[in-house]
Amino acid sequence: MLTMIAMKKKEAGVTLIELMIVLVIAAILVAGIYSLFITQSRSYSVQDQVAGVQQDARVALNIMARDIRMAGLAAGRGSGTGFTDGTLSSILVNGFYYAVNPVNGANAPDTLTVVLGAEALGRVLSVTGTMIQVTDDGINPKDVDYYFTDAKKNYIAFDQQPGRLYQVNTVSDTDITITNFPSGVTTTVGGKAFGVQAITYSVGADGILKRDTHTSASSNQPLAGDGINTFVEDLQFAYQVAGDTGWYHDPLTDFPAGKTRADIRMVRINISVRTAVQDAVVQDAASTSAKFNQPALEDHTAGLSGPDGFRRRVYTTEVNVRNL
């Protein structure tokens, strides 16, 4: 008699070794995905910061170039005694003598102040004695009155009298009474009237480039950099004077003999900006991978920052001062 032997079927499943292999492969995949995510995140963060820095610098450069290009508009180039008014004497615009007023920072950011007819007020409708009437010329007449409400906004010039700058005495709507205005002079009728301002560009220790119109206590406003996301690291200027192709940095020390700030004809603007956060891979000067340095600009060649992990951008442009 044959005996039937029952065979137990092997149950399906994985061994411990197979499970460990699967876990190792999964861990490798997760690590790879995480590493890719971190790399892409860092790259995006750097690109985002650099894009913001570049945009800030370009906007600031355009505004500075516009103001510098128009320096001396209607007001004239100025002199060692100031600007000429109706009595051929000289007056200062918020303490400034020239249309272009450089201050060389040596191994620190430079400062530059330009004087120009920055605000178009309208056209001269009539002249009665020392009082002129300005048309609204498409703007609200109250804007003319409002413009001169601050004591520091009290300078006016006309395109029909280039190189003459006058001090405003009183304003009522569009009627402006001018100090030392030649009584009865009608050559300004039909011409444009400009509110004259002194505009200063400077960089503070907080990394903010400011534009100050000297018109009120709150007129020194940020133009580029915020000290949080973007830092303006340096601002440097160089100048060409009439009859010379060289570039100079300080009218008090290196301008050619006989040349003054009134002879400036071209300005080179250099602005250096950096990110607020160091590159995650390049953290500090102690790191062997630290490779970023603040660039030397014009005569600012010492006391530069770096090596560090801050990414920097430098922008340069040359501007013809067309009204001088």
Image (cartoon, rainbow, N blue to C red):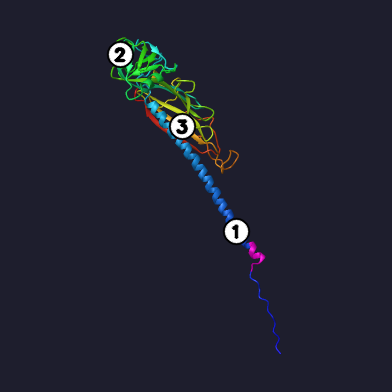
**Residue placed under numbered mark 3 in the picture:** 271
Q: Of the residues under marks 1 and 2, which one precedes in the sequence?
A: 1
Residue 65 colored magenta?
no
Identify which residue is drawn at 66% across, 67% down: 15
Q: How far separated are the C-alphas under marks 2 and 3?
A: 45 Å
Give the mark, 3 or 1, whose residue is nearer the N terminus.
1
- The percent position of residue 289, horizontal first and vertical second, equals 57, 43
Question: Is residue 114 shown to the viewer in this render?
Answer: yes
Residue placed at 61% from the left, 62% from the top?
22
Q: Nearer the viewer, mark 3 or mark 1?
A: 1
Identify the magenta region.
13-20
Is 15 magenta? The answer is yes
- Marks 2 and 3 close (CB-CB < 8 Å): no
Magenta span main SS = helix
Question: How far apart in space, not on screen, are marks 3 and 1 (Cα)?
Answer: 50 Å
Taking depth in this image into account, of 98 and 184 the one nearest to the observer is 184
Does 172 appear above or below 239? above
Helix, strand or loop under label 3: strand
Query: Which-is-in-front pick, marks 2 and 3?
Result: 2
Q: Which residue is mark 1?
A: 26
Q: Which residue is mark 2?
A: 127
Badge 1 marks a residue whose secondary structure is: helix
**Between marks 1 and 2 in the image, the one whose residue lies nearer the viewer:** 2
